[in-house]
Image (cartoon, grey):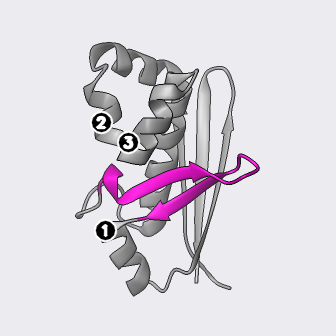
Amino acid sequence: MTIIGIGIDIVEIKRIKIMMHHYPHQLPKKILSANEYMMYVHHHNKCNFLAKVFAIKESASKALGTGISQGISFYHFETYNNNLGAPKLKLLKNALKISKKLHIRKNHVSVTNEKKYLCAITIFEN
């Protein structure tokens, strides 16, 4: 397999916390899909959940080569966890169209976090 794209993003958790304070209802709805929102409402640490999803989607958009622009938004990606709790990524709408043009067949996502920062990396392969 050949690597098609690599994207990385780092988020300062305090920044997400401040944004959540200013936009408690708008921020989650701007970033999360309907499925992610259902997980968010029941999550015990909403700030870390939002930071994780934000970082994954940003890293995925960078790996795709577009960033969150050029017809790509947060709604074009959906995150979930496998049965072991590892983060997984699903491409939707325009992200899926671009991935087909680039012959992306597989993606890998990894997340790490500390007290102040959360980092995500996404790799796309054909």
Residue at figure coordinates x 52%, y 48% from the top left: 56
Residue 96 lies left or right of residue 53; in this view the side is left
Which region of the structure is painted magenta?
73-91
Which residue matches tag 1?
A: 93
Which residue matches tag 3?
A: 32
Residue at figure coordinates x 54%, y 38% from the top left: 52
Asked if the residues shown at circle 2 and circle 3 are in contact, with their CB atoms under 8 angstroms apart, the answer is yes
Q: Say whether residue 9 is magenta.
A: no
Residue at figure coordinates x 35%, y 41% from the top left: 31
Q: Is residue 43 above or below residue 57?
A: above
Please state, as top left, top right, bottom left or bottom right, where the C terminus lies in the image.
Answer: bottom right
Q: Please tell me in which quadrant of the rendered image residue 94 appears.
A: bottom left
User: What separation in Å lies between label 2 and label 1 (alpha carbons)?
Assistant: 18 Å
Q: Secondary structure at mark 1?
A: helix
Residue type (three-letter) at the residue carrying disc 2:
Lys
Residue 102 lies left or right of residue 123; in this view the side is left
